[in-house]
Image (cartoon, rainbow, N blue to C red):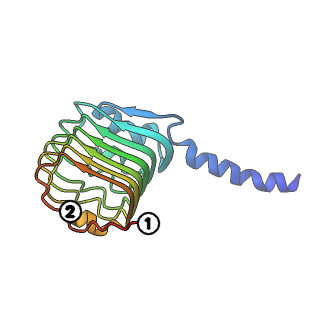
Amino acid sequence: MKKLIAFLPAILFFFHLFGQCPTGNLLLSTQAEIDNFPINYPNCTSTFNSLEINGNSITNLQGLSSLQTVGDLTIKNNPNLTSLSGLDNLQSTFVFLFRNNDSISDFSGLENLTFATDIIVEYNNSLTSLQGLNNVQGTFILDINSNPSLTGIDAFLDSLKSAMQVIIRANPLITNLNGLEVTLA
């Protein structure tokens, strides 16, 4: 009985840490939902659920500044989002999907991201560089598709140590893949 009583505070502490985060997958589709995230989920730093940011009214991600770990992170269809600042503390995610965000030119704000199992970057008309993702050391799948203004991927490829599958297609301004070394097994 004494062991159970001694163990109880540790259990309560664990649930207190994760009890502040969403209990299921979360869609944030308005700026108000982003702004209210720290109010609705105080002290939330890690969630293994999916987080989708998808909305015409979203202009900034400052309300998400406490997040360090997210299960899957999808940022798509945000025409008025101009920066990823607010995700400055994000260190890891499983799938990072970045699609149809036409006002963002690079990944500034994601400099602390070091782990993502899959990185999918597609259909972003103003994206010119992968700057900001330079601390990701390895990924299983890297898929860069249909980003018509993208030119600057060399620094990212130089910093990437490993990838199981690399798909780079329909990016007309990419003229070389300097930094990409291929090792055949």
Query: Distance of mark 2 from mark 1, alpha carbons?
Result: 20 Å
Cβ–Cβ under 8 Å for marks 2 and 1: no
Quarter of the picture containing the C terminus is bottom left
Q: Quadrant of residue 135?
A: bottom left
Q: Residue at x 20, y 67 (%)?
A: 178
Q: Residues within 10 Å of mark 1 (few under 14, many from 20)?
A: few
Image position of 43 (left or right of 77): right
Residue 7 is marked as none
Please provide percent x and percent y for residue 21: 51, 42
**Observer-nearest of 113 and 172:** 172
Q: Choose the circle earlier in sequence order: 2 or 1.
A: 2
Q: Residue at x 41, y 54 (%)?
A: 116
Q: Quadrant of residue 29?
A: top left
Q: Residue at x 81, y 52 (%)?
A: 5
**Observer-nearest of 165 and 117:** 165
Q: Secondary structure at mark 2?
A: loop
Q: Amino acid at mark 1?
A: Ala
Image position of 80 (left or right of 138): left
Please provide percent x and percent y for residue 170: 18, 45
Q: Residue at x 36, y 50 (%)?
A: 65
Image position of 149 (left or right of 158): left
Please provide percent x and percent y for residue 19: 57, 42
Please provide percent x and percent y for residue 59: 22, 39
Q: Residues within 10 Å of mark 2 (few under 14, many from 20)?
A: few
Q: Secondary structure at mark 1?
A: loop
**Mark 2, mark 1: which one is toward the viewer?**
1
Q: Amino acid at mark 2?
A: Leu
How many numbered marks appear? 2
Q: On the image, numbered disc 1 is attached to which residue?
A: 185
Q: On the image, numbered disc 2 is attached to which residue?
A: 177
